[in-house]
Image (spheres, rainbow, N blue to C red):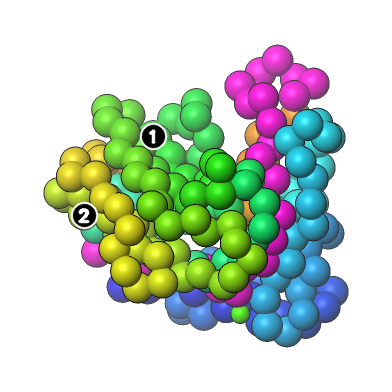
């Protein structure tokens, strides 16, 4: 079942990313993000910059009280279309390292997209064998099932880890474009960078079960 369908086709200046899934999981569009009617464009803030922008650099979708945006123990698939030329940034995540209930995260260390599902008990992460920060559009799809986490790039299986990733349900929002709890002037955040994503995202879709 589709639980999130952000087409990101909003016009310039829009502040709400409409969810077409029917669940009403609309996103809040931060000020850094330029919408153009077709996709969303994030500006560039390297980790070394060290400035905390809060929600300005993010599209945030609140946690759903009914759990529909959490994997729980179910099959869970995430797909998005992205274009980037930088080798850093967290594209999409629900929760950070210290989140109670686990987390889900996509990042692109060295320009290779990775997908991680982490429950309180076990972590399953896999990294693309395809260089994804080459300035071309890529469809990234990560399928979490009872037996594996499988990562597809442009419809082709790129890598997988054959491992159950457990029961994941936290109270955190989905953040598109980086972390939210990452003000490094605070000792409590547990983050050394906001890992702000520079690039474009055409859409984000999720399915549960
Ligand atoms: Ca939740
Ligand atoms: Ca779009």
Which part of the image, by quadrant, shows the C terminus?
Answer: bottom left
Magenta span includes 202: yes
Q: Position of residue 193 (x, y in %)?
A: 69, 31
Q: Residue at x 66, y 40 (%)?
A: 195
Q: Which residue is mark 1?
A: 101
Q: Which one is earlier in the sequence, the residue at label 2 or at label 1?
A: 1
Q: Is residue 181 above or below residue 91?
A: above
Q: Residue at x 50, y 26 (%)?
A: 98
Which label belongs to residue 145?
2
* Quadrant of the rendered image containing residue 76: bottom left
Q: Residue at x 49, y 74 (%)?
A: 5
C-alpha span from label 2 to label 1: 18 Å
Q: Residues within 10 Å of mark 2 (few under 14, many from 20)?
A: many
Instruction: Name the foreground residue: 18 vs 83.
Output: 83
| Magenta-colored segment: predominant secondary structure | loop
Q: Position of residue 158 (x, y in %)?
A: 33, 58
Badge 1 residue CB within 8 Å of ligand 1: yes
């Amino acid at each position: 079942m589709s639980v999130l369908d952000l087409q990101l086709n909003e016009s310039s200046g829009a502040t709400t990313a409409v969810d077409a899934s029917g669940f009403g999981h609309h996103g809040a569009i931060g000020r850094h993000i330029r919408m153009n009617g077709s996709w969303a464009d994030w500006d560039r803030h390297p980790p070394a910059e060290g400035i905390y922008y809060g929600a300005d650099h993010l599209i945030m979708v609140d946690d759903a009280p009914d759990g529909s945006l959490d994997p729980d123990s179910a099959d869970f698939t995430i797909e998005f279309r992205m274009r980037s030329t930088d080798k850093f940034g967290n594209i999409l995540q629900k929760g950070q390292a210290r989140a109670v209930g686990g987390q889900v995260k996509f990042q692109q260390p060295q320009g290779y997209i990775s997908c991680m599902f982490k429950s309180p008990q076990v972590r399953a992460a896999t990294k693309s064998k395809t260089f994804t920060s080459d300035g071309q559009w890529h469809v990234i799809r990560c399928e979490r099932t009872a037996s594996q986490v499988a990562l597809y790039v442009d419809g082709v299986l790129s890598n997988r880890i054959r491992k159950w990733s457990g029961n994941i349900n936290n109270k955190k929002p989905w953040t598109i474009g980086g972390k939210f709890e990452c003000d490094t002037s605070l000792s409590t955040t547990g983050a050394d960078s906001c890992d702000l994503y520079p690039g474009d995202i055409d859409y984000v879709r999720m399915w549960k079960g």
